[in-house]
Amino acid sequence: MQEAMTARAADEEDEDTFILWVLIWSELAAFGILIGAFLVVATIASQEFSVARLHLEPGIAAFNTLVLLTSGWQAAIAAQKGASVTTRRRGLLAAALLGSGFVAIKLYEYGIEMRFAGQAEFRTFFELYFILTGFHLFHVAFVAIILFVVAWRPRRANVELVTTLWHVIDLVWIVMFPVLYLV
């Protein structure tokens, strides 16, 4: 009887992990397509994109990258094996607060960049830029809310699931940042 219960618990854990990996790979595919589209259009309209990039705020974006990576570090602390409930909760709350800070900083950055988005010569660049960064921003905001929820009852399995997804969002930004601001 005990073996059957253990086997059933392992099967349920495998199903949870499978769904997580389906979500992660679908997210990576979606962002990969968006980044690929941005790079193709940037190659075709390289002159226009180079000039449009001059109107971005790479200093703000670099600082925001540090905020997001610090958030990922806090999520990693929460996900450590053997972490106490208090450590998990603090790490998740810190990750969520820093993620919310990322959202606020990005919205501030949008406010600065918005004045250039309506100019005809920059329209294509800024359309793709706002689609790509807005899609990422939505993910950061949504998962930050989930981090707050999981922090309320930080069960080990939930912490592992949400922090894994959070790290994928970090990874996507690490790829997006140089493509958008530095290339």
Image (cartoon, helix red, strand yellow):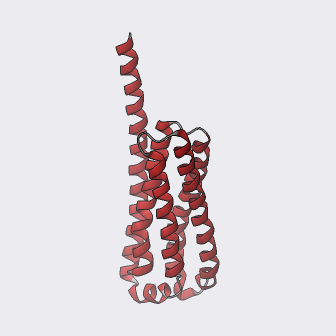
Q: How many numbered discs sit on the rendered protein?
A: 0
Q: Nearer the viewer, residue 135 or 147?
A: 147
Q: Is residue 140 left or right of residue 104?
A: left
Q: Nearer the viewer, residue 178 or 82?
A: 82
Vertical comparison of 30 with 49: above or below: above
Q: Nearer the viewer, residue 48 or 69?
A: 69
Give the residue at x 53% y 62%.
135
In what quadrant of the picture does the C terminus appear? Answer: bottom left
In which quadrant of the rendered view does residue 80 lie? top left
Residue at the far top in the pictured view? 1
In which quadrant of the rendered view does residue 44 lie? bottom left
Expressed as whole percent of the image width and height from the top left, the position of residue 53 reads 48, 84
Vertical comparison of 3 with 150: above or below: above
Vertical comparison of 109 with 104: above or below: below
Give the residue at x 38% y 38%.
18
Give the residue at x 58% y 47%.
146
Expressed as whole percent of the image width and height from the top left, the position of residue 94 reads 57, 55
Give the residue at x 49% y 62%.
70
Expressed as whole percent of the image width and height from the top left, the position of residue 114 reads 62, 80
Q: Nearer the viewer, residue 88 or 64?
A: 88
Expressed as whole percent of the image width and height from the top left, the position of residue 137 reads 55, 63
In what quadrant of the picture does the N terminus appear? Answer: top left
Vertical comparison of 12 with 84: above or below: above
